[in-house]
Image (cartoon, rainbow, N blue to C red):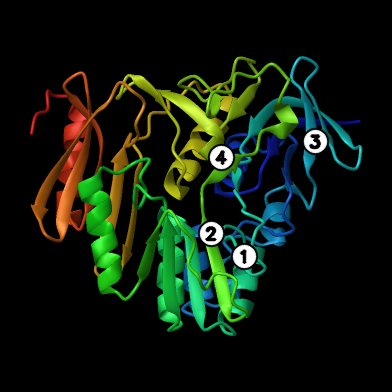
């Protein structure tokens, strides 16, 4: 069994940022990152640009292996952690190697849900996913997307970029029905149809099994939690942490997509799944693993723009039973959906209204009374 001062499970932007933050403050302690992919850090947000041929593959990498060694950060890639014993401060990888840690950061994110139903089915999360899409999209004549959300929109843009006949299969309630009210969903579908996308509601495209069809899925994410299930950590649609990103165990922290933290600004627990939040939370986790006790309270912002469609998510944009949802239709191409709780704005979704982003972010952070 090896001893590690700071052990980080997950080598993405959150884990790498945490390790680098620790190293700046502590030049001597042993830092080890365990990453199940075989690559150093790369940008997931640049993957669509690589797939469309707008960036070279090597350009999406943000670090190389030499970077880690130069900073005296050990980077163990291609290894999967299979068990955690927080009481004894011990983790084990699938090859049986054990590590005893002083402080532990869990930042494993999640993996895309799969249908495992179609021959030419693709996800779009990892560099290897992207490589497969690049190979297959050039041989296809039709593209079918199953699901809603940001990844579905990335596939729409990719398939349209390559000139494929593009089909989108959404639930019978519409696009992103678990987030969007009908007016917003209908507007997004309208704008996609104007781009030439054929939309199917509650059914598959009849072309989904054709030999010349590539299938892209955007049906959600399963958080990577199997290795710590039964370990006594509090998991509730995310690994629950306090305002310093610490779990119920004093020396175990979580960051990135996995962490469900208490936002003092919003007076509620939130979990955000985007690149910026992962990077910022990784920095705070690094500080707090050094006992800095810095309060983390990031207000999430995430956006996507393709062709004539722009969507921005601000703050908490979700349905939890305690939130009132209202939609303001501004024009036949613009609308804003608001998430209001206790008379205050917790979050919003802006469709083709990027100019309102900063003002609404200020309103959310002000915690002033809000009414349409």
Per the model, the C-alpha gap separating discs 2 and 4 is 35 Å
Whether 147 is drawn above or below 17: the answer is below
Residue 67, quarter of picture: bottom right
Query: Which residue is disc 4 drawn over?
Result: 21
- The reply to whether the C-beta atoms of the residues labelled 2 and 4 are less than 8 Å apart is no
Looking at marks 1 and 3 on the same chain, the residue that comes earlier in the sequence is marked by: 3
Residue 360, quarter of picture: top left
Q: Which mark is residue 82?
A: 3
Query: Which residue is disc 2 drawn over?
Result: 217
Q: Which mark is residue 106?
A: none
Q: In this orientation, which residue lies closer to the viewer: 32 or 175?
A: 175
- The reply to whether the C-beta atoms of the residues labelled 3 and 2 are less than 8 Å apart is no
Q: In this orientation, which residue lies closer to the viewer: 118 or 71?
A: 118
Residue 234, how many percent across, how many down? 60, 18
- The reply to whether the C-beta atoms of the residues labelled 4 and 1 are less than 8 Å apart is no
Residue 307, how many percent across, how many down? 29, 72
In the figure, is residue 7 to the left or right of 92? left
Local crowd size for mark 4, using a 10 Å CA cut-off: few (<14), some (14–19), many (≥20)? some
- The reply to whether the C-beta atoms of the residues labelled 1 and 3 are less than 8 Å apart is no
Whether 67 is drawn above or below 110: the answer is below
Mark nearest the camera among 3 and 2 is 2
Q: Secondary structure at mark 1?
A: strand
Residue 220, how many percent across, how many down? 51, 47
Residue placed at 44% from the left, 42% from the top? 277
Query: Which residue is disc 1 drawn over?
Result: 121
Per the model, the C-alpha gap separating discs 4 and 3 is 26 Å
Looking at marks 4 and 3 on the same chain, the residue that comes earlier in the sequence is marked by: 4
Mark nearest the camera among 4 and 3 is 3
| Quarter containing the C terminus | top left
Q: Secondary structure at mark 2?
A: strand
């Amino acid at each position: 069994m090896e001893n590690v001062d700071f052990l980080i499970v997950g080598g993405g932007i959150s884990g790498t940022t945490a390790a680098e933050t620790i190293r700046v403050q502590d030049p001597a302690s042993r830092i080890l990152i365990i990453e199940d992919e075989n690559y150093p850090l790369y940008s997931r947000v640049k993957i669509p640009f690589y797939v469309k041929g707008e960036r070279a593959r090597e350009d999406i990498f943000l670090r190389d292996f030499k970077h880690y060694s130069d900073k005296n950060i050990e980077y163990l890639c291609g290894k999967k952690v299979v068990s955690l014993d927080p009481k004894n401060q011990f983790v084990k990888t699938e090859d049986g190697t054990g590590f005893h840690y002083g402080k532990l950061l869990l930042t494993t994110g999640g993996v895309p849900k799969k249908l495992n139903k179609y021959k030419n089915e693709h996800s779009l999360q990892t560099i290897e996913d992207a490589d497969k899409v690049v190979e297959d999209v050039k041989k296809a004549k039709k593209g079918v997307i199953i699901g809603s959300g940001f990844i579905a929109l990335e596939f729409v843009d990719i398939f349209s970029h390559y000139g494929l006949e593009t089909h989108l299969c959404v639930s019978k309630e519409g696009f992103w029905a678990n987030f969007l009210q009908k007016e917003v969903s209908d507007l997004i579908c309208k704008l996609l149809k104007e781009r030439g996308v054929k939309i199917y509601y509650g059914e598959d495209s009849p072309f989904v099994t054709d030999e010349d069809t590539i299938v892209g899925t955007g049906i959600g994410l399963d958080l990577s939690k199997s290795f710590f299930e039964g370990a006594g950590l509090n998991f509730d649609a995310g690994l629950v942490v306090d305002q310093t990103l610490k779990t119920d165990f004093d020396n175990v922290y979580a960051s990135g997509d996995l962490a469900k933290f208490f936002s003092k600004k919003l007076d509620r627990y939130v979990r955000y799944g985007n690149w910026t939040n992962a990077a910022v939370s990784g920095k705070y986790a690094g500080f707090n693993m050094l006992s800095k006790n810095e309060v983390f309270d990031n207000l999430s912002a995430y956006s996507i723009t393709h062709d004539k469609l722009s969507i921005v998510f601000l703050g908490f944009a979700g349905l939890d039973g305690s939130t009132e949802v209202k939609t303001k239709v501004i024009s036949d191409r613009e609308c804003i959906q608001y998430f209001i709780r206790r008379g205050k704005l917790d979050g919003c979704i802006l469709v083709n209204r990027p100019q309102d982003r900063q003002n609404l972010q200020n309103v959310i952070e002000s915690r002033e009374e809000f009414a349409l």
